[in-house]
């Protein structure tokens, strides 16, 4: 759609007249116009918003956050002009770091460009917004935050495990049916094996998947049970899932625990109340949402209610806040459905943002930000080609298989939108820069070891001479690949003074809870060789004591800690370790229990972010053991967090800066790389068994059939949410799940390719591991299907390995 259809026309004569009589101090309108004119066409459409719904579908590198920050600042300025009320703009984004980034940009526009107070808006994550509403109306939300504990449950969390055990006790007949599977000869060893698989893997995975899917969509266990009556599968999968979900909810309520989905539900309970809803709506003049492709149904519902100016009539009606010509929604949603990469392990589904785009398009309220200055032109061409090729292959496959394709093509992997280079005179400095080398380099090494040789040589060429000039990253599909690469590249990076930063290693450690637990376990049982060794390892890791033979120290704890008069003199390194350990034991005796975690954090010489994380951990643990304050209770709570829960650290450093420093070679997963960019991006190990991957059933659970209960349940729930006429049976649901997985993996590759600015280096070795848990077990591996297509499309970018080998 054209700008003339979208924007409110400016009366040119009035504007010329105003500018001709301009005073030495620019007016607010002139300042707004100056910001607008500094933006690209797609960003300008966002800046021209004044009311109503608006969808912005943006390509990678189009400047979404800058455009949204500018549009937000302009909207706040107009609100200052037209109203004396104190209504606020609410900006919502996906992560805390993104929220901090966009808040800083809005403040800069208000301060530097508009000379306005840096107020009139709030920036939240979706869960932060929900918690804020629930906290302000605790009587309606049912959340007394001083009494509840927020958790991030995983498949191994004790509430999930306990829910499974309780369900088994309450449903012995259904459990027996699962135990029998497709066939069972009654052999006792096999029975015990299947029991273990069901209790520790299959049912916890089903519970974890369905709880997130259902809660995030406002589906109760009772409704899920009703849906199960429409299915005829032999295991009654949705009925089993409903029972597990119900047990989990009962456990959470009985212990005053909540999860992130409970925050959204609590906020919606508040907004069911007419008075509270009007209070919240009257504080807001509009809602801007970033990364809208990652929203779940309930999150979308929450934003639509807050952005609505009309009388709200019922939360669960199909007509609720639908976009129409007369819609009262002051809601701007910005996203890229082609960067939706969380839908197979979170309840997010790009279909909802696609629907919003379609509804806005019907009333000419859809804008596309398709100009991107991040990457050189050859990288843009490669990404565009990959998108179209994947969609064409998907449609050809569905046609071959005689599958019914939906009229709106909502299930194809990509929305058809092309990345275009920016126009001449674009305000971005060095937009669409000149490529380094070919800009796109395609390699087919002999094996993964040859891959490392080729990659190493290119890294040295690019970073070796002036490592402070450019940034580089290796994007991997799995953390295990990153770990293997880090080990292989560390000696070379040290030799050439290149900083190697393995993001996965930092994440894997989850080091604050683990290190605190190790020291507390030692304080509780100092004569345990295992606990002493774990504590010493933590102290060595933090460089508080010299590296030494810890096994020798831990083998005789008493002699190490309190050597007798006849003992051989301890070396200085041992004495230092012993003194530090004894100081920990003294603190255990002298300090109150609630101060121990903070003391240990200081002892470990934590930085600002780690201290903040330790304080958060201490608050969580002390809250959890209130009423039963003991060392045993504290250790139990900490052990639970370390073993079965993802404890979110407090970030004080900008994560983008940490990952994209110049002169640094960052190893990071494709998922974590979203939203970031580097001058040089390396994509090794592009094989079909990982992208798009094979949807497979673990051998240990194949007695249940050629599908997994969790994925079938997920596909059945989504089919119902997408308002399909019937719930698919098991075989259909399994095929739907396969397609969802395939689509998301291809979108992940697209995200990875579009992170590169100057050079995109891609490789698929002829031999690679079948599984990266055994990287030495090499075999012939087919490349990711997109890779040979790229080689055919860009033959000039296929690298001559013979010539390169002569240089090595």
Image (spheres, rainbow, N blue to C red):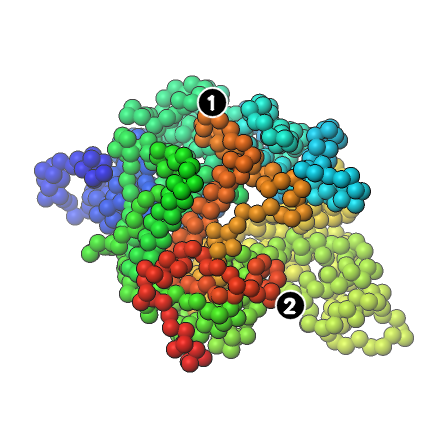
Q: Quadrant of the C terminus?
A: bottom left
- Give the image location of residue 302, x and y in percent: 45, 30
**Within-10-Å neighbours for mark 1: few <14, some 14–19, many 20+:** few
Q: Residue at x 53, y 43 (%)?
A: 345
Q: Residue at x 48, y 32 (%)?
A: 719
- Give the image location of residue 537, x and y in percent: 70, 64
Q: Secondary structure at mark 2?
A: loop
Q: Is residue 803 above or below residue 691?
A: below
Q: Residue at x 65, y 60 (%)?
A: 604
- Give the image location of residue 546, x and y in percent: 68, 72
Residues at discs 1 and 2 in contact (Cβ within 8 Å): no
Mark carried by residue 543:
2
The residue wearing badge 1 is 316
Nearest to N terminus: mark 1 or mark 2: 1
Q: Quadrant of the N terminus?
A: top left
In this rendering, which labeled residue sits more in front, label 1 or label 2? Answer: 1
Q: Is residue 520 above or below residue 237?
A: below
């Amino acid at each position: 759609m054209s700008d003339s259809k979208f924007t409110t026309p400016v009366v040119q004569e009035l504007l010329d007249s105003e500018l001709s009589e301009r005073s030495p101090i620019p007016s607010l309108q002139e300042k707004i116009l100056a910001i607008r004119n500094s933006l690209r066409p797609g960003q300008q459409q966002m800046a021209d918003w004044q009311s109503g719904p608006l969808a912005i579908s943006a390509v990678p590198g189009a400047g979404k956050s800058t455009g949204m920050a500018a549009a937000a600042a302009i909207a706040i300025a107009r609100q200052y002009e037209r109203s004396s009320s104190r209504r606020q703009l609410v900006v919502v984004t996906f992560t805390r770091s993104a929220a901090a980034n966009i808040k800083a940009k809005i403040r800069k526009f208000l301060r530097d460009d508009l000379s306005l107070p840096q107020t009139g808006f709030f920036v939240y994550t979706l869960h932060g917004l929900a918690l804020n509403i629930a906290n302000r109306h605790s009587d309606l939300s049912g959340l007394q935050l001083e009494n509840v504990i927020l958790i991030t449950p995983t498949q191994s969390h004790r509430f999930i495990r306990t829910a499974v055990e309780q369900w088994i006790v309450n449903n012995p007949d259904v459990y027996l049916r699962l135990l029998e599977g497709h066939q069972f000869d009654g052999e006792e060893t096999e029975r015990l094996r299947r029991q273990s698989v069901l209790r520790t893997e299959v049912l916890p995975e089903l519970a974890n998947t369905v709880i997130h899917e259902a809660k995030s969509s406002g589906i109760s266990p009772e409704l899920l049970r009703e849906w199960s009556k429409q299915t005829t599968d032999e295991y009654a999968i949705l009925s089993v899932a409903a029972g597990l979900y119900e047990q989990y909810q009962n456990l959470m309520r009985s212990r005053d625990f909540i999860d992130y989905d409970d925050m959204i539900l609590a906020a919606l309970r508040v907004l069911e109340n007419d008075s509270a809803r009007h209070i919240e709506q009257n504080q807001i003049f509009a809602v801007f949402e970033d990364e809208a492709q990652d929203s779940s149904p309930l999150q979308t519902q929450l934003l639509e209610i807050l952005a609505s100016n009309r009388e709200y009539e019922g939360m669960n009606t199909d007509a609720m806040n639908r976009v129409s010509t007369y819609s009262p929604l002051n809601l701007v949603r910005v996203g890229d459905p082609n960067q939706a990469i969380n839908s197979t392990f979170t309840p997010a589904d790009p279909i909802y943002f696609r629907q919003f785009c379609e509804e806005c398009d019907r009333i000419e309220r859809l804008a596309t930000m398709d100009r991107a200055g991040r990457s050189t032109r050859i990288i843009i061409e490669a990404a565009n080609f990959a998108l179209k090729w994947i969609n064409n292959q998907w449609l050809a496959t569905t046609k071959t298989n005689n599958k019914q394709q939906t009229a709106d093509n909502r299930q194809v992997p990509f929305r058809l939108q092309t990345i275009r280079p920016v126009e001449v005179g674009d305000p971005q400095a060095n937009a669409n820069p000149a490529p380094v080398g070919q800009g796109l380099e395609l390699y087919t090494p002999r094996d993964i070891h040859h891959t490392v040789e080729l990659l190493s040589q290119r890294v040295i060429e690019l970073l070796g001479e002036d490592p402070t000039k450019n940034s580089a990253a290796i994007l991997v599909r799995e953390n295990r690949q990153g770990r293997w690469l880090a080990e292989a590249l560390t000696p070379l990076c040290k030799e050439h003074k290149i900083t190697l930063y393995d993001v996965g290693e930092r994440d894997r450690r989850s080091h604050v809870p683990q290190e605190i637990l190790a020291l507390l376990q030692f304080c509780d049982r100092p004569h345990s060789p295992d606990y002493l060794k774990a504590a010493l390892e933590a102290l060595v890791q933090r460089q508080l004591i010299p590296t030494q033979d810890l096994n020798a120290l831990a083998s005789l704890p008493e002699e190490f800690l309190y050597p007798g008069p006849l003992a051989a003199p301890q070396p200085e390194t041992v004495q230092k370790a012993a003194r530090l350990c004894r100081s920990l034991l003294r603190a255990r005796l002298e300090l109150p229990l609630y101060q121990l975690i903070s003391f240990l954090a200081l002892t470990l010489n934590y930085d600002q972010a780690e201290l903040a994380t330790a304080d958060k951990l201490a608050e969580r643990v002390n809250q959890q053991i209130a009423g039963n304050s003991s060392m045993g209770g504290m250790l139990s709570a900490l052990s639970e967090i370390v073993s079965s829960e993802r404890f979110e650290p407090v970030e004080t450093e900008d994560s983008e800066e940490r990952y994209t420093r110049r002169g640094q070679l960052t190893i990071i997963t494709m998922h974590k790389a979203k939203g970031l960019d580097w001058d040089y991006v390396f994509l090794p190990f592009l094989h079909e068994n990982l992208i798009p991957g094979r949807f497979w059933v673990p051998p240990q659970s194949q007695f249940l059939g050629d599908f997994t209960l969790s994925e079938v349940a997920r596909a059945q729930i989504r089919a119902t949410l997408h308002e399909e006429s019937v719930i698919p049976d098991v075989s259909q649901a399994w095929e739907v799940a396969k397609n969802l997985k395939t689509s998301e993996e291809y979108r992940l590759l697209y995200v990875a390719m579009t992170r590169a600015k100057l050079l995109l280096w891609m490789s698929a070795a002829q031999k690679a591991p079948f599984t990266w848990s055994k990287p030495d077990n090499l075999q012939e591996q087919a490349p990711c299907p997109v890779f040979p297509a790229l080689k055919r499309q860009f033959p000039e970018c296929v690298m001559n390995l013979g010539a390169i080998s002569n240089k090595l």
